[in-house]
Image (cartoon, rainbow, N blue to C red):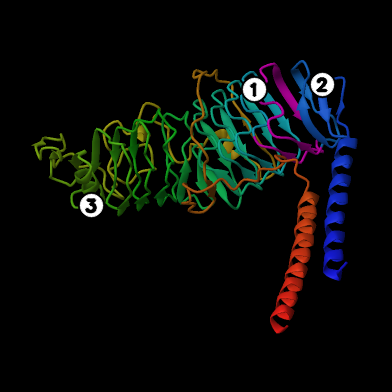
Amino acid sequence: MKKSTRTGWILITLALVMGVWIFTSHNSQADQTTNAGFVLSDDGSRLKSYQGSGGSVTVPSGVTTIDAGVFANNTSITNVSLPSSVTTLGSRVFSGATNLRSVTLGRVTSIPASTFQNCMSLTQVSIPSTVTSIGSQAFYGCAALGSVSVPGGVSSISANAFGECNNLTSISASNSFYSSYDGCLYNASGSRLILVPPGKSSISFSNNLRTIGAGSFSYNRNIRTVSVPSSADAIESGAFTNSSVSSITIPKSVVSIGSQGSWKPSELYGYQNSAASRFASANNITFIALDPGSGSSSNSDNGSSSNSGITNNDDPDQPGDDDDSDSDSNNDDPDGPSNDNNGGSGNNSRNNRDGSNSNSSRKNGSASGNASYNNGGSSANGGSGSSIAGGRGKTYNGKDYTPKTADTDLDPRYAMCGVLLLLGIFVMVSGNKRKLTLVSKEKKEN
């Protein structure tokens, strides 16, 4: 037997023997089931499934990994407590657990995609300081959730992580990636609005606002009137897509307005020859000019004009007006009708932050709420969301890069077996090819 053929057979045999050894070793590691219904790996470090009776559930100490979907669609569990040994969650761990009310997450490092999707009774989640990312649709459809505190280590939050959380009114954050103001999520400097919670009914903007980010109002159906402050200079594409904002005031300072899809407010207040007027004209939106003395409005559908009710003796607020009697110091820009910032409360000033914001901690996060949900049938059709970094984060149409851990049982040693098998076949084939070439050459010479 030639050397190359012998080497090839050795490699193939080694691959087969190794494969059989790995297979038998897996079978010898029998799962163990506890009296409480937890199905654990042989060494007790991995929770593979749950067959218990539900109610308040405490995962055994020593478990470090919880596989994907372990509690998914389980309607009997009401409270779950994970020990501090748990560091890794698979995706969809609690998805569809509609009666789950509270969860303690141990020391997990990320909240992967769809972890709590459609947990419609969830009112409280303690997010540990070890969490660094919150994945796509992680809390999507948690209709009873009232507030969320983002811990100091979180550097990535998916665009649709809190979609359809219709009672969520406050997100508090304070770290090197995120901040919050009036219950809304901003980048660290407060210059870019990232997310307006779906449950908020009015908004007061950060003093440092420069950009209204893409998708920031997309899941909010309650805010009808928005007055953009004069500190802002850009409104990104999709910022108001799918929102219910019907009246908006945009100051001269805004020089860039991206496409807003099908969103079309009933009236847009702004200044002539500005980005606001051009946007209104391009999208057939009724434009009401706020220029002193203009006293006119126009509908770009037919070019007609009518009295806007603004006279020379009642000019709109100008930046820095001394006679501005508006109790909300948030806006130096023109005040449109029914401005949310000037509305019924009368105290919605920049200094009126949500209490949870002022007490937000860099270490521990939490999510809580007492409101009863009213969209019990909400479904999650948002698809995969992209990750928003604390900066400008424009990658809204990309993949969700939150780690999908504990989702596969494939042993990487099988790959090594495959490599050895292919290498053995290659050695044998190449050796025989050289032999055939030599035989052919000898025949030609003879």
Is residue 263 visible in the rendered image? The answer is: yes
Q: On residue 37, which mark appears?
A: 2
Magenta span: chief secondary structure:
loop
Placement of the N terminus among the 4 image quadrants: bottom right
Residue 301's mark?
none
Q: CA distance from mark 1 to mark 3?
A: 52 Å
Circle nearer the viewer, 2 or 3: 2
Magenta span of residues: 64-91
Q: Residue furthest bottom?
A: 445
Left or right side of 239 for 30: right
Query: Which residue is pictured at 47% across the width and 47% down the height?
Result: 396
In which quadrant of the rendered image does the C terminus lie?
A: bottom right
Tell me which amino acid carries mark 1.
Answer: Asn
Q: Which residue sits at x=86%, y=45%?
A: 20
Q: Is residue 43 visible?
A: no
Q: Secondary structure at mark 3?
A: loop
**Amino acid under label 2?**
Gly
> Does residue 81 lie above or below 411 as drawn?
above
Residue 274 marker? 3
Q: Secondary structure at mark 2?
A: loop
**CB of mark 2 within 8 Å of CB of mark 3?**
no
The residue closer to the viewer here, 94 or 234, is: 94
Circle 1 crowding by C-alpha within 10 Å: few under 14, some 14–19, many from 20: some
Q: Name which of mark 2 and mark 3 comes first in the sequence.
A: 2
Question: Reading the chain from its start, which is encountered first: label 2 or label 1?
Answer: 2
Question: How far apart are labels 2 and 3 at the CA level?
Answer: 65 Å
Q: Mark 1 and mark 2 in contact (Cβ < 8 Å)?
A: no
Which image quadrant is residue 218 in? Answer: top left
State the image coordinates of residue 106 (x, y, percent, origin top left): 76, 36
Q: Residues within 10 Å of mark 3 (few under 14, many from 20)?
A: some
Where does label 1 land, which residue? Answer: 73
